[in-house]
Image (cartoon, coloured by chain):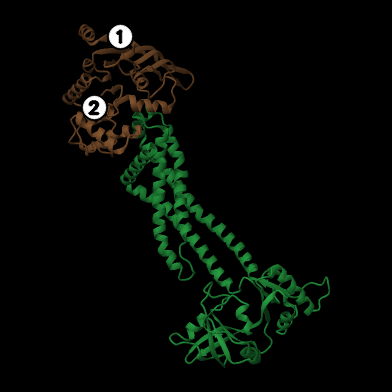
Amino acid sequence: MNNDSVVINLQQIKKNYDMGGVEEVHALRDVSLQIHKNEYVAIMGPSGSGKSTLMNIIGCLDTPTSGLYEFNGTNVSQMNDNQLAKVRNKEIGFVFQTFNLLARSNALHNVELPLIYAGIGSTERKRLAREALEHVGLGDRITHKPNELSGGQRQRVAVARALVNKPSILLADEPTGNLDTKTGEEIMALFEELHGKGNTIILVTHEESIAEHAHRVVRVRDGSIESDLPVEKFRQVVAHS
Amino acid sequence: MHALSEIKEGLIISLQAIRANKMRSVLTTLGIFIGILSVTMMATAIEGVNRAFEQSASAFGSEVLYVQKFSWVGGDDWWKYRNRRELKVEYADFIARQATMADAIAPTVETVKDAHYESRSMLSAWVTGTTNEYQNASGTTIQDGRFFSQEESDGGRPVCAIGANVAETLFPSTDPIDQTIKVGGYPYRVIAVFEKQGGLFGAFTSDNRIYLPIKSFLSQFGTHHEVSINVRVAKSADTEDAKDELRGIMRKIRNLRPGQEDDFSINQQDLLTNVFSSITSVIAGVGFFITGLSLFVGGIGIMNIMYVSVTERTREIGIRKAIGARRRTILFQFLIEAALICLIGGIIGLIVSYPLSLIASQILPTAMPLSVVFLAIFVSLLVGLISGFLPAYRASKLDPVDALRYE
């Protein structure tokens, strides 16, 4: 893999939280990580390991205390709020554990939202949003509100919303956490399909069984990367432990 | 394009939020509704009083000077005015001979008498005795018939011109012209009816008046009435110059030595208008302050509810930020919501105050002026934007990570 295809380049990222001045919490210590185009990476770690902080930084929701973060070759570690909002809008598709759909809006409008913020006109927006919903198998549910959809369907709407702006990465935070096993498997199958179509996927989870769906597993512990293995190696390690 | 679709999105969200919290929205809107209602009613009332006054004052005529014993303003000096020598009807002729800047001069005397026509009567009508010059030396207009001629005036003929209310009262269904009415017990033939002037309960105007030739008036009702002399300034002359000239003539008539104070007053419409506008501006100031307070309270209600709304929707704000909403977008969203609530309140306030203003127009010559409508809409929007700003700003500053974590 050559350097041009690097989507995410983290170099010596540190993140400290100031807890009332006396002591600082080192959420991330010296994390360096590269993720290439069309990779399917799982970031794994127990709660408190720093994986959420890492996800927030990768997702441009937060900025590192120090270190370099290049996204598609652009330094985003020093960007201001508005610039970050633009990166989130165009380059990152979020999928959350609790779906995070707007309760009062129907599926179509939820999917339209990133396009509204991108400034795309109404007709084009509706077409793209409908297409995205059809891709996740919800073409017949576009006027339903979240409370009229099942958990799996809601997460599919969220995936459609994440992908509608054709982002560089899909960032999923415990996407199966609120779903039963069967529905969870369906969502993971959808991710596999999306990866097959060329999407770059970053999966944040604490479950090994979910992490195993990825092709590369990065383990985080105490704010540092503990291991970074292809999934086959990861399975062996898990099996031996 | 971008900002437009953001505003449209803001409107959709606001309507959803307002619909989702109906009771809360109604109560919040009520505050603004009451505020706008009181402001518009206040503005309508002030406008009405002003219009009424203008109509009343127009009876004086803007270019007519009134030579009188009392001044229209400066009531503190009442005793000084009281002790002045009376003015005489004959002054009018003297002024007419001397003045170069006046083109109509009419002495007037007035009293209150009952008027009757057949079985109908008008009690306590104002009765004015004057000359044929009066119609040129006042702000009145004849609607039917003609004012008395010089012959009728000089001869003290038993003819009269009546105001609109007098005509309505005595002649509800018949034509008053050439009918004979009794004024203070004496018969007078009606030869003219004045146009209705309206105004504040007919004060100053011709509406409740009966005009008689002054000679007839003096012989029937006595000569002890206070005399006022109307002097109209010629079109070509400057009012202030004419006033100076008139003052000189009057001082000559009264044999005043240089340095001696005037023992007469020269009044004009402007005096009243100035006094009146200074009074109404005080009333308006106080009124708008008080009604403004109710709007202020309404605004606090909006601010309060917007803070609640922002807190309730912290997570939604987080979601929106995560998928690319900028600070400005969030700020706009909540500003639009606050403005929309206020605008709805303001429009309902207008809808309710419009029929109320129609009721008020029965008493005051007024309807809600268009300026008040725009003012109300503008003010309600402004209240929304001001009171919505702090909550909206707080929403826009929320950290997306914290907002997403908010339960």
Residue visible at 37% across and 23% down?
A: A60
Image coordinates of residue A16 in percent, x first then y, are 43, 17
Examine the image and state in which quarter residue B219 appears: bottom right
Say if A198 sits above or below B17 in the image: above
Examine the image and state in which quarter residue A72 appears: top left
Residue visible at 61% across and 73% down?
A: B61
Residue A95 located left or right of residue B202: left
Chain seen in green: B
Q: Amino acid at mark 2?
A: Asn
Q: Do the CB atoms of the residues marked 1 and 2 lie less than 8 Å apart? A: no
Colour of chain A in the image: brown
Which numbered disc covers residue A227? Answer: 1
For the question of whether residue B71 can be seen, the reply is no
Say if A59 sits above or below B116 in the image: above
Residue B54 located left or right of residue A13: right
Image coordinates of residue A215 in percent, x first then y, are 23, 13
Question: Which residue position is annotated with label 2?
Answer: A178
Q: Is disc 1 surrounded by few (<14), some (14 to 19) or many (20+) residues within 10 Å?
A: few
Residue visible at 34% across and 20% down?
A: A55
Q: Chain of mark 1?
A: A
Image coordinates of residue B103 in percent, x first then y, are 67, 77
| Quadrant in which the C terminus of chain B appears | top left
Residue B73 located left or right of residue B36: right
